[in-house]
Image (cartoon, rainbow, N blue to C red):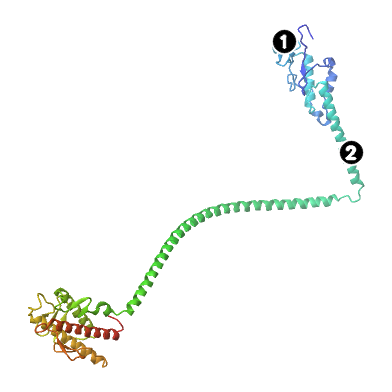
């Protein structure tokens, strides 16, 4: 160390980066030795070395290193301990050029410290041994091939190689063709993917339409079942109606004590039972309607009279006289002297007699239970006749005559129903 405690160092090891001291013998290298050192290590690179390299190019130059200049106690320094850039000494230039030449001619950067150099020598020795072993192996194998009588024919191998090259070319052409086919298939796949998306959209639309129509079908089936139930119920009602007598349903003739009734309207009067004229008139309206329906059913046209159903104001029209006879009354009974009402009841009984004659003409075995003759009704069991008129007649006999008349109508209704298969 010098007086300031600093060791002059010019270079650092290229492996461990530790400062190194250069041997003094390197400062006294002659031109001949320098030229020999500049020769390439490998013989095939002799002509590539330029002995007149530019002294100003130092690819592996390591500037002077001063130990006290770095943060870890190491650093660079010039031999003259100068900080500014100055012209290097000839010895330093020579050393740098030497190290640069050594580094460019080998895979190892120089300079190296002693320890690193020993380590590198050990590594190179191991590599040398490996290379020698490989050389021996190759050499032995070559001898084996030279001594082997079954040495492969080179011409055959070349022929096989040529065939393999032709095969390779064919395979390359096939590979090119397959790549083109792959591109075409990829294009078709893209088109099919687009078609798939369209089909998926159509499928979604189809299922929406299917669901809609399925719902409509279910509603329609519900309506169909409902209609079938209604039809079945209507058929049942129709069968009941077919078995029913429309005349009996429409015109229910029965009795209530001494009174004959039609649709629950009493026809007649008794001293002990007062019946309003409104009820009697309504009963006469139903009676006239029934006889008109029966006559129309058997295509009977009455002679001399035409009965007109008009509710509780029904009447009998005298043909050829343009005269109407009312089948309804008003006021009291004892002082009822309206001869037109009596004439209307006699005319109605005449029409009922014509209906009896037409029925007996068609069916010889059919007979009404009570005979009718000129406004009177005869009871065959007693032979007594009852007038249908009010004048000069008692309420009891008039009421009984009306009851017998309704009985004859009921029998006539039953015959018409049996003859025409219960059709109205």
Q: Name the residue nearer the viewer: 7 or 105.
A: 7
Residue carrying label 2: 136
Residue 198 showing in the rendered view: yes
Extreme residue in the bottom direction: 364
* Mark pair 2, 1: CA separation: 57 Å
| Residue at 78% over, 51% down | 162
Quarter of the view holding residue 243: bottom left
The residue lying toward the viewer, choosing from 209 and 264, is 264
Percent coordinates x, y for residue 34 in the rendering: 83, 20
Q: Are marks 2 and 1 in contact (CB under 8 Å)?
A: no
Q: Is residue 56 left or right of residue 274?
A: right
Q: Is residue 28 above or below residue 165?
A: above
Q: Relative to 311, is 103 on the left or the right? A: right
**Looking at the image, which residue sits at the far top?**
3
Instruction: Report which quarter residue 372 is drawn in.
Output: bottom left
* Rendering coords of residue 205 (x, y %): 47, 56
In percent of width and height, residue 172 lies at 70, 50
Q: Please rate how many residues cluster around mark 1, counting C-alpha atoms within 10 Å: few if below 14, some from 14 to 19, many from 20.
A: few
The quarter of the rendered structure image containing the C terminus is bottom left
Q: Position of residue 67 (x, y in %)?
A: 74, 14
Q: Describe the element under mark 2 as helix, strand or loop.
A: helix
Q: Which mark is residue 82?
A: 1
As helix, strand or loop, the secondary structure at mark 1 comes to: loop
| Between discs 2 and 1, the one toward the N terminus | 1
Report which quarter residue 290 is drawn in. bottom left
Report the front residue among 71 and 109.
Answer: 71
């Amino acid at each position: 160390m010098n007086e300031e405690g600093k060791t002059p160092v010019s270079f650092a090891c290229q492996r461990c980066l530790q400062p190194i001291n250069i041997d003094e013998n390197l400062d006294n290298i002659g031109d001949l030795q320098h030229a020999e050192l500049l020769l390439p290590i490998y013989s095939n690179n002799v002509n590539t070395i330029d002995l007149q390299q530019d002294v100003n190019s130092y690819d592996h130059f390591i500037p002077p290193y001063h130990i006290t200049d770095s943060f870890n106690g190491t650093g660079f320094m010039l031999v003259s301990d100068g900080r500014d850039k100055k012209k290097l000494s000839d010895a330093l230039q020579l050393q740098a050029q030497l190290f640069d030449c050594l580094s460019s001619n080998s895979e190892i950067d120089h300079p190296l410290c002693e320890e690193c150099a020993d380590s590198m020598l050990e590594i190179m020795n191991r590599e040398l041994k490996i290379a020698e072993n490989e050389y021996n192996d190759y050499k032995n194998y070559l001898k084996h091939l030279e001594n082997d009588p079954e040495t492969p024919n080179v011409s055959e191998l070349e022929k096989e190689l040529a065939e393999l090259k032709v095969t390779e070319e064919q395979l390359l052409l096939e590979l090119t063709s397959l790549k083109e086919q792959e591109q075409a298939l990829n294009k078709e796949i893209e088109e099919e993917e687009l078609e798939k998306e369209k089909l998926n959209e159509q499928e979604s639309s189809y299922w929406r339409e299917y669901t809609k129509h399925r719902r409509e079908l279910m509603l329609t089936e519900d309506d169909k079942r409902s209609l079938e139930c209604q039809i079945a119920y209507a058929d049942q009602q129709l069968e009941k109606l077919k078995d029913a007598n429309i005349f009996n349903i429409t015109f229910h003739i029965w009795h209530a004590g001494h009174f004959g009734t039609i649709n629950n309207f009493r026809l007649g009067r008794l001293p002990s039972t007062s019946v309003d004229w409104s009820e009697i008139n309504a009963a006469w309206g139903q009676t006239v309607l029934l006889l008109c329906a029966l006559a129309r059913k058997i295509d009977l046209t009455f002679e001399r009279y035409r009965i007109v159903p008009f509710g509780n104001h029904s009447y009998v029209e005298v043909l050829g006289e343009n005269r109407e006879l009312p089948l309804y009354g008003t006021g009291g009974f004892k002082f009822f002297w309206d001869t037109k009402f009596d004439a209307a009841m006699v005319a109605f009984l005449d029409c009922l007699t014509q209906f009896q004659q037409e029925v007996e003409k068609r069916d010889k075995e059919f007979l009404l239970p009570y005979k009718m003759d000129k406004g009177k009704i005869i009871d065959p069991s007693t032979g007594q006749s009852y007038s249908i008129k009010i004048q000069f007649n008692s309420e009891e006999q008039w009421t009984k005559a009306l009851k017998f008349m309704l009985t004859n109508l009921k029998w006539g209704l039953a015959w018409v129903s049996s003859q025409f298969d219960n059709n109205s």
